[in-house]
Image (spheres, grey):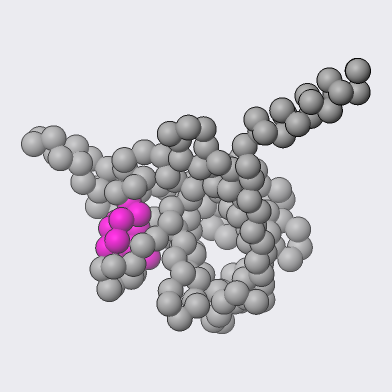
Amino acid sequence: MRRSFLALGFLLAACASPSETVTSSTLVAADAATSLAVGEQITAQEVSQAGGEGQDPLISLTLRHSDGRTLTFQEANHSPNDVMAQAAGGPLAQLMGLQQGDEITTLYYATNGASGAPFVCGPQGPAAIGKYEGSDGIIQIVGMREAIQFDTRQDGQVEPAPYSPDHVCARLRFRRG
């Protein structure tokens, strides 16, 4: 009888815990500048946890250097400003230098999940990164010293604040390996 309750408890716990999807890939430097900045390859691991009812999923991205250092980010998919920043042709696409106007980018904010010294953007690491995978298979990652800021105009409309090229601390290009 006790075993039945224990087994039932494990089954209920498994059903109640959010589902999690883990995707891992090797990113190989696609140009000399990326190779100089981070080496020939890094590993990207994306973990997606289903959100509760009516909530966005929690998506984490960990970039792991070949020497073991890691940088961890959380996808910015929760606020209206985050959604606006990632819109096709939006502020993040412009910051990344994407010119078509239909590119959809993904914004991630740094978390405290780093191990070892950051391997991009100096000793402080990036505050945020933008990621874009083109139809040609090239994955672009742009490190930013600070998050994209938004201002509310007098008419109540929200717009991105002007940004400086100095906000970008890394421009990396990869292929899946």
Residue at the spot 28% in from the left edge and 58% down from the top edge: 90
User: x, y (%) of residue 173?
Assistant: 51, 73
Residue at the spot 63% in from the left edge and 42% down from the top edge: 19
Kindly indicate the quadrant of the structure image that contains residue 11.
top right
The answer to whether residue 59 is left or right of residue 66 is: left
Q: Is residue 58 magenta?
A: no
Question: 40 or 165, which lies in front?
Answer: 40
Q: Is residue 76 above or below residue 8?
A: below
Quadrant where the image shows the C terminus: bottom right
Which span of residues is magenta-colored? Answer: 85-96
The answer to whether residue 23 is left or right of residue 168 is: right
- Report the number of numbered marks: 0
The residue furthest top is: 2
Quadrant where the image shows the N terminus: top right
User: x, y (%) of residue 116?
Assistant: 72, 50
The answer to whether residue 68 is left or right of residue 7 is: left
The residue furthest left is: 155
Residue at the spot 54% in from the left edge and 58% down from the top edge: 121
User: x, y (%) of residue 27?
Assistant: 62, 71
Residue at the spot 37% in from the left edge and 65% down from the top edge: 96
The answer to whether residue 39 is left or right of residue 165 is: right
Report whether residue 52 is seen: yes
Q: Is residue 92 above or below residue 148?
A: below
User: x, y (%) of residue 171?
Assistant: 47, 68
Q: Is residue 89 magenta?
A: yes
